[in-house]
Amino acid sequence: MSKEADTWTSSRYVLLLLLVIFAISTAEERNIYLVLVEGDPVAFHQGSLPRVKGAKFDPKRQVYEVSKAHAKHLVESHDQFLQSTLSKGSYSKLYSFKNIVNGFAVHTTPSQAKKIKDAAGVKLVEKDRGAKLMTTYTPEFLGLPEGIWTQEGGDKNAGEGIVIGFIDTGINPLHPSFAYDMMDPPTSKLSNSSGACEGGPQFPATSCNGKIVSARFFSAGARAATTLNASVDFLSPFDAVGHGRSVTKKYIIFSHVASTAAGNFGVPVVMNGFYYGRASGMAPRARISVYKAIYPSLGTLADVVAAIDQATVDGVDVLTLSIGPDEPPEDSLTVLGTFDIFMLFARKAGVFVVQAAGNHGPSPYTVVSYSPWVVGVASCGTDRTYPGTLVLGNGQKIAGVGLSGPSFGGGLFQYKLVLAKDAVKLNGTFPRTLQYVEECQYPEALDPIAVQGSVVICTFSAGFYNGTSTLTAIIDTARILGFMGFVFVANPVYGDFIAEPIPFSVPGIMIPRTSDALIIAQYYQQQTSRDRRGFVTKYGGKAAIGEGRSAAYMGRAPVVSRLSSRGPDFIDVARNPTDVLKPDILAPGHQIWAAWSPMSALDPILSGYSFALLSGTSMATPHIAGIAALIKQHNPSWTPSMIASAMSTTATKYDKSGEPIMAEGPGIYSLYPSTPFDFGAGLVNPTRATDPGLVFLSEYEDYMSFLCSLPNADPATIRTATGESCSHSFRIPSDLNMPSVTVSALVGSQSVRRSVKNVASKPETYLCAVLPPKGVMVDISPPWFTLAPQEIQDLELKLNVTQALDSFSHGEIVLTGSLNHILRIPLSTFPVSIS
């Protein structure tokens, strides 16, 4: 072959290679899309048996053959639609939604997704936004042992006959909180519940033991979005994270997530050889259905909504969502995003749905729970703390934080105090970065002779500020070099830091305040001798670390947690406010003991532990789920809106001292007077919620009327998202019959309507009173009324602006009954102008 031919052949290969590279680089990246299409799902198909308005969907009452045939028809219709609409090989169908919503999840390119959006019969196409985790003393703090537990026959009957569904990271079936007690088996049959036990790695099919009645996993979205790590992303209901699972003076409440709501009663909690007490869930006799939809590597909305679809048809009474999208939808109203539409239809099927409000506080407009058909939960702390103490050689005691035992001798013997920076090897070959020099991250950087048997001071510096340094590394360094203990101190350069109690396997304490760190620094410098070059010649300081694992019960409580997302609720990505109060309710979620997965795939410092002390609205949410189960057990015929109303109207906005609840502000250790946008109706009161006297009823048709009354939405948009036409609309969105009143733009005067139903056993007379918001005059009609059992009374509020303001103001309506029922209804208005 000639040289010219060789050159031509080589050129062709190069050109072909460049074309391939270009094609790869310009190829569209696939995404997951959630698609809703026209047609009834199984739960609401005409062939199904009629249901009582607001009652729970009962899969066992449906005409089996009709439901099965319709489900098959829907799946086939999804397949045919995709085959006829999209190019061959351009997509992968991940799920067919058929139980409460008709639609599917598909993994495809943006151009193919546009074809779906433009096709006939398609209601909604939404790009998957992903899903994230929103991550005791709580039974006594909430009055359960002496209250509602007693009404239901004690802890051994609390929650009996109720099934709580958990969509989360899975469950550890071997944990004693989820064990089946053969000596005391359940006394009720679950006639309205079905399910399955899907086995897999770390989760035998026999794991559903009677306490766990159903366990499934959903992974198609996660597997399409990334390559899963087989060592932690188990394709089974097994929990490798720990988020899927809390503690009181007397009872340590199993508080995250399944264990908080429904963990067994009386489970011993032992960590690092220390006994903390016994654990119990809010409704310890409730049964558990698990739906794993979040993996250590990631979570997708497709997996979450597929789990909602399945949990509803499985017949759960309560559905717990400590997870969800972390941002509002970009292309639709917040209440019309796919996630909220699925929750709407779960609610239509009679399921009480509870959702974490989010962990983006304390800034306003940060809630991620938007819809009135879902109960959004805010987080607060209790009065339990775990104080630690550092005792200096001069007798000074410095308060700190650290869930650890004392230095050897129970804190009585004192040991040499060494600043890590002074113990760095002079001839080491390691980089002289702050992580090596100050932060105790690398044992090879420190002189073992100087630090062995000493209490070593490690400093918060750049590595901790940017998130590259860890407490786990300090603990490893301490263990390897034989520290007697470590002190992790604040740095004036970076200011105070927030310290949460973390179990240390070696004695340790965190000093988060710079003022305390300066006291330690001054003592250390006074007791340390140096040569002219500044090198230490004698360590004269002494210190001991005291016991940090004993709980103390003091101080103000509850206090709304800093991280808990705040209202007001908003309708779109521009955060325009809407006439719904969010969050709805407040529950303990700060420093909550949780049953934990020893694998702890996302948090190495908790590896090997069966319990953990955590904070977040994820921890608050299952408290409300468990309490909802107790209320449902006490009042079996109540609908979800009745349960939500009872919780809201009986909640308290005062702390244990009778003072208004405070909230943590943006400044560390700062507090400010809280409002309903921080705590909703207030701290839940489980015992009072079982007997509220009156309830505010809202059902599916009311939610549709609410949607149709939104000024931001037209009827076509509503029909597109829900499949329902706007045959009826409220005058204004704030006419939705919620146990709160929110008017986001009050101009001149406006009337708002409510109605209440007497759910007590006797007639009762109620007196109406109003504490008006600033800038607004409020009249309520009638001023008093008498209701017999099951009767309904209409109420009308007339609001008149007396002063225009530049923000919301808050008040409340109080209905006081002659038989000691008292209902409080939050009233939030934004008075825009007088006329």
Image: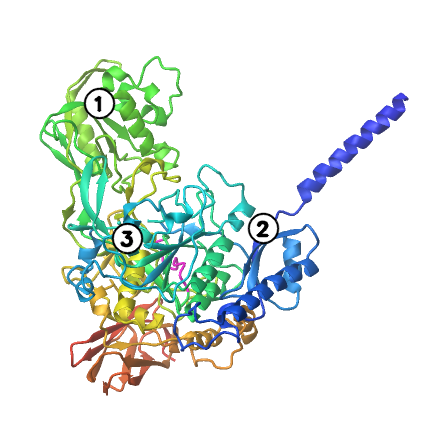
Q: What residue sits right under mark 2 in the picture? A: 31
Q: Which residue is mark 3?
A: 263
Tell me which residue sits at (11%, 33%) in the image.
396
Judged from the image, the secondary structure of the residue bearing numbered disc 1 is strand
Residue 604 falls inside the magenta stretch: no
Residue depicted at 56% across the width and 47% down the height: 224
Q: Residues within 10 Å of mark 3 (few under 14, many from 20)?
A: many
Question: Up-down: is 580 above or below 448?
Answer: below
* Pointer 3 or 2: first along the chain: 2
Report the amino acid beneath label 1.
Val
Secondary element at image label 3 = loop
User: What colour scheme governs how the chains and residues are painted in the rendered image of this protein?
Assistant: rainbow
Looking at this view, is 411 or 517 the one in front? 411
Q: Indicate the quadrant where residue 635 lies.
A: bottom left
Where is residue 406, by image quadrant?
Answer: top left
Would you say the residues marked 3 and 2 are in contact, meaning their CB atoms lie under 8 Å apart? Answer: no
Q: What are the residue bounds of the magenta stretch?
A: 361-370
Residue toward you, 425 or 802? 425
Neighbor class of circle 1 (other Cα within 10 Å; few <14, some 14-19, many 20+) is: many
Query: Disc 2 versus disc 1: distance between alpha carbons?
Result: 54 Å
| Residue named by callout 1 | 418
Secondary structure mostly seen in the magenta stretch? loop
Q: Nearer the viewer, residue 19 or 428?
A: 19
Where's residue 769, x and y in %? 22, 79
Amino acid, disc 3: Gly
Q: Earlier in the sequence, mark 3 or mark 1?
A: 3
Which quadrant of the rendered structure holds the C terminus?
bottom left
Closer to us: mark 3 or mark 2? 3
